[in-house]
Every structure is written in C-alpha cells, then in structure tokens.
Amino acid sequence: MTWLQRIKDGILTKTIEKKETPDGLWAKCPSCKKAVQTKIVVESNYVCSCGYHYRIGSDLYFDLLFDNGQFEEHFSHLKARDVLSFTDLKAYHARLDATRKKTGLDDAMKVASGKTDGRPIVVACMDFKFIGGSMGSVVGEKIAKAVDLCLERKCALLIISRSGGARMMEAAFSLMQMAKTAAKLGQLDRAGLPYISLMTDPTTGGVSASYAMLGDFNLAEPNALIGFAGPRVIRETIKRDLPEGFQRSEFLIEKGFLDKIIDRRELKESLALFLEFMYPNASKATT
Amino acid sequence: MVFLDFEKPVADLYEQIEKLQVLAERKGVDVSDQVKSLEEQIESSRTKIYSELTRWQRVQLSRHPERPYTLYYLDQICEDFTELHGDRRYGDDKAIVAGFGKIDGESMMFIGHQKGTDAKSRQYRNFGMPNPEGYRKALRMMKIAEKFNKPVVCFIDTPGAYPGLDAEERGQAEAIARNLIEMSQLRVPIICIIIGEGASGGALGIGLGDRVLMLQNTWYSVISPESCSSILWRSWDFKETAAEQLKLTAEDMKGFGIVDQIVKEPSWGAHTEPLKMAQTIKRNIKKHLKELQTLSPEELVEKRIEKYSSIGAYA
Ligand SMILES: [Zn+2]
C-alpha cells in the first residue's frame, strides 16, 4: 500500500484534497493549524507533532497493530438493512448507499485477526466516517461474531471505539445492540479471555454505555471525548458552559474510568505489554 | 381527570355534562336523559379515538400525568414491600427505587424507575432520570437477589439517564454498561416491564431480562421522538414524524421480536383504572415467573444470551 492510497483511507482525505498542490502534499493540523508534510504525518501514525491525533479508520489501525501489516478480515459479508423503512431528511437506505459509495466501507466496523508482537488477537475497529461511527445491527453482530472467534481460537479481543453512539435509523434494534454486545462480552469474560477496549475521539452514547466501558482494561487515546451524554446535551441541561477538558481522556482517568492513556505512536508497543500480561504464558504463541 | 390534546372531544363532552349538572342543581330540572346520551357519546368518541391512536399519541399516554408509577404498582401487588436504599459507593438515587416484597407469598426483588406525582416530588425524583448511583443501587440489589436465589422484577419508566455534569463525572456510561453485562449473566430470572417511557440506555440499564413486557400505551426506543426530531430533522417540530419513523410502540416492538408480550391496558389507559392495571401486571409476573422457574440457572443464562445475540436486522 503506498502512502498516497493510505491517505485516501484516513480521515485526512478531505484536508489533503483541499491542500493538494503540484509540488507536494501538505496537511493542516486541525489543532495547531500548522501545515505539515503529509508524509511526515503518515510516518508518525497520523499524530501531529503538537500531539493531535487524527481521526483515522480501521484500515490504518489494522496496518498499525498487526505484525507486518498482515491480517485477515472477517464477517465483511454483513450489510446494514433498512428494516424500519426509516426516513428523516433522507431515506436510510439511500443514506446507506451514498455512505458506502463515498467511504468505500460497508458499515461502521471492521473485524480482523492477526498477530500483535507475535500474539494472536482479534481486532474490531470502528469507522467514524460511516454515519458518525454509529452502532447498528451490523456493528452488534460483528462484535458478537468477533467474540465467538475469540472463544474458538482462545485469543484476545481488542475493540477500538470511535462513535457518536447508537444509530437512530435502526431505532430499537440499535439500542438492543448494547445488550447484545454486553451479553457476548460476558461470555468472553466467563471464558477467562482478555478483552481490551481502546476509546478514541469520540466515544459517546450507546457505545460508551456498552462495550467501550467493559474492558478488562479500558484504554484511550489522548484528548478523546468520552462520555454518555454529548457535551451539547449536557450544556442544555445544566444551562452553563462545561469546564475545560470535561469528558476528555485526561478527565476520565482522573475520575477513575480509564486504566491508561496511550499515545498512538506508542500504541503497538503498549498493547504488546498488555497482551503479555494477559496471556496465560509469557512466551509468544507459535500458532 | 386530565385530558390529552387528542382527547379534546371527550373533554368537551364531560364539560357539557358538568354544565348540565350545575344547571340541574340550580333549577331543579331532570337532566338524566341528556347526561345519559352524552355519556354514550363519550363512550363512542373515546372508542373511536383509542382505536386509531397514533404512535405519538401512545407516547403522550405513556407520559400521562396521572399514570401510575413503580411504587404505586408495588403497593398494589406486593405484600410487605420493604424499600432498600443506596449503592454503597456514593448515595441513594431517588429516580430508581428498589426493595424486596412478596407476590402471593413468593419473595422477589423489585427495581424500578420512579417519577414524582407533583411539582415537588417530580423534582425529588429527578423526573425519573437516574444518576449512576441509581444503576449501581439496582445492580447491588440484583446481586443480592442472585445470592439468595430470588427472581428480579424491573419496572421501566424513564425519559432517559440524567445527562448532567455529575452523572458524567461519576461514570454514567460505565454504570449502564456494567448493568448490561451483569444482567446478561445473572443466575436468577429477570422480568422487565415497561410501564411508561422506555428511553434509550437509561431504560435498558435496568431492562435486560429473560422476559420483557410492554404495557400497551408505552414506548421503547433508542431516543425520544423530540430529541430524534431535533437531531435528524434539525428542528423540534417533527416529533410526531419521528415517533412514526422510530416505530416505538409496544405493537412495533412485539412485531420486531424485541419484546415478548404486550400487556393490555384498561380501555382508556392505565391511569383510568390503575387498580385493574396493577392486577393485570401481577398476573403476568406470576405467569412468566412460573415458566422461567422450570429452568436451571445455566439454562436461564444461556437462553438469555441467545435471545439477545439473535436481535439484529442485517443482510
Ligand atoms: Zn498539530
């Protein structure tokens, strides 16, 4: 995969398209506003020198986490269905079609298996650009199947969350995915298998109130928005501004809801340590 | 009697009866025939209205100010209800009540959202919107029920988990998530009954069970019609449309296989004959419990996980 293609997969696409110049590619950091050579951003796992973490998607995380970028994708046959014939300003089925076309994704989550630092792992990763990373039936079923795969292979599960919450267009079905994923994670837990949750910006609503908060270890990227209610709703409820840094990773770790905040540039190294601790024997699996 | 906007024809007829009766008293005339005719009109008007309730009207009924809440039902169906307090971590949430009691001699643990009945008590109950300690109190009671092998009955009626600053600080998301995983693995029967509003994670936080029942005029969805309207239609004016699109009634939910049974309400809603409603609820708890008690704890948990694992619509 060339870095040009990789950019297309990431959230950078828009910025890059706008910034594309004949003599090279530049990315403007949404946080520090500095223009940086895209190549450099890519090389630092999409983290700006100011520390800003770009909102990358599943393909980039898979590339980053699996040894030699080798992995097998699973359950990609699952497709969302407009079971309610839901129509707001746009029909849900049309929204799905348009989003699939625009993003090249089938839904807001991909599941893949491979090895991280020699240890087998199943990674389920959300894609924010697919309807705000919203959780519907497909996300729920992919997590359920990912758990089954872990049970079958007796290996660890990592879920990387980046989501505004449940998908409204699937109404009660999406709500029930909270129960479904929790029930499946309960099975994984009883089997004594490791589950790591990595929360990225943002992780809110029905996703934070189900699988994202249920890790043996709850991890987060720096400065990620993590909470149940969104900041706007809270502001409207309490009728005043929210304190600086409220609902950010650094706030949550102070309140006791995260084990560790991990810079993406050190994510793989750090994850390897967690896996080493969680796997029954320290030696790397040979299968 | 409080009438909802769509009951205006009925309210008008009642007003006419009142006027007639005042007149009768003042002038000493017999109005019984006219009253009787008006009462017949009320009956037929109501029958018509209630036979074609829209989804939004069901939502309105679920929030009727005279609708019975958890403690009313417990008072009616339970012998020796003993309320229990606190999550042992932070405090005692007033929007979720819990305690043990007996139904026809059989002990169980009851948990439910609780709304207030007047301005002051509504405030006290935080309008039925729990903070994390409410969910943690509920979980504590469920674990006690499990320890002493007693079934759990949950009454659901909330406009949502409280979206406040403190609630976030104390981990609203974690509290709900924890309940979901623990309820999915609990080794005693869980029966959940939606008695009013079933709003999103705030409802589901005490709503995962072996049986989920919905009273006829209640709703259950991922978001309230109002919030859905404001987000997807970018205006508060589409709540009726949003309710239609969300397909959030008991009938919808039963059709989707998401709830197990619709519990019939008295003709004009639970609030018009609350005692009758309570008796129906009691009968249904007993019926479902009897079925569930034939299962071993292992079977119970396995079936529950299977049930939730199978919910989803995808191609
Ligand atoms: Zn920067």
Image (cartoon, coloured by chain):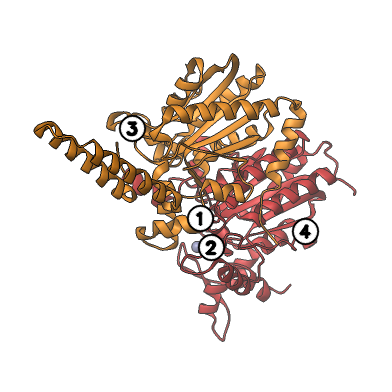
For the point 64% across and 52% down, the residue is A160
Number of numbered discs visible in the structure rendering: 4
Report helix, strand or loop for mark 2. loop
Q: Colour of chain B?
A: orange
- Protein chain holding label 1: B
> Mark 2 = which residue?
A86
- Between the C-alphas of marks 2 and 4, the distance is 28 Å
**Which of the two marks, 1 or 3, is nearer to us in this view?**
1
The amino acid type found where label 4 is placed reads His
For the point 33% across and 32% down, the residue is B122
- Between the C-alphas of marks 3 and 4, the distance is 49 Å
The amino acid type found where label 2 is placed reads Phe
- Between the C-alphas of marks 1 and 3, the distance is 27 Å
The amino acid type found where label 1 is placed reads Leu
Q: Residues within 10 Å of mark 2 (few under 14, many from 20)?
A: many
> Mark 3 = which residue?
B122
- Protein chain holding label 4: A
Residue A278 or residue B108, whichever sits in front: B108
**Precedes in sequence: disc 2 or disc 4:** 4
Q: Colour of chain A?
A: red
> Mark 1 = which residue?
B246
Verify CB contact (< 8 Å) between mark 3 and mark 4: no
Q: Are marks 2 and 1 on the same chain?
A: no
**Which of the two marks, 2 or 4, is nearer to us in this view?**
2
Residue B183: x, y in percent? Answer: 63, 33
Q: Quadrant of residue B315?
A: bottom right
Relative to A86, say whether B88 is above or below: above
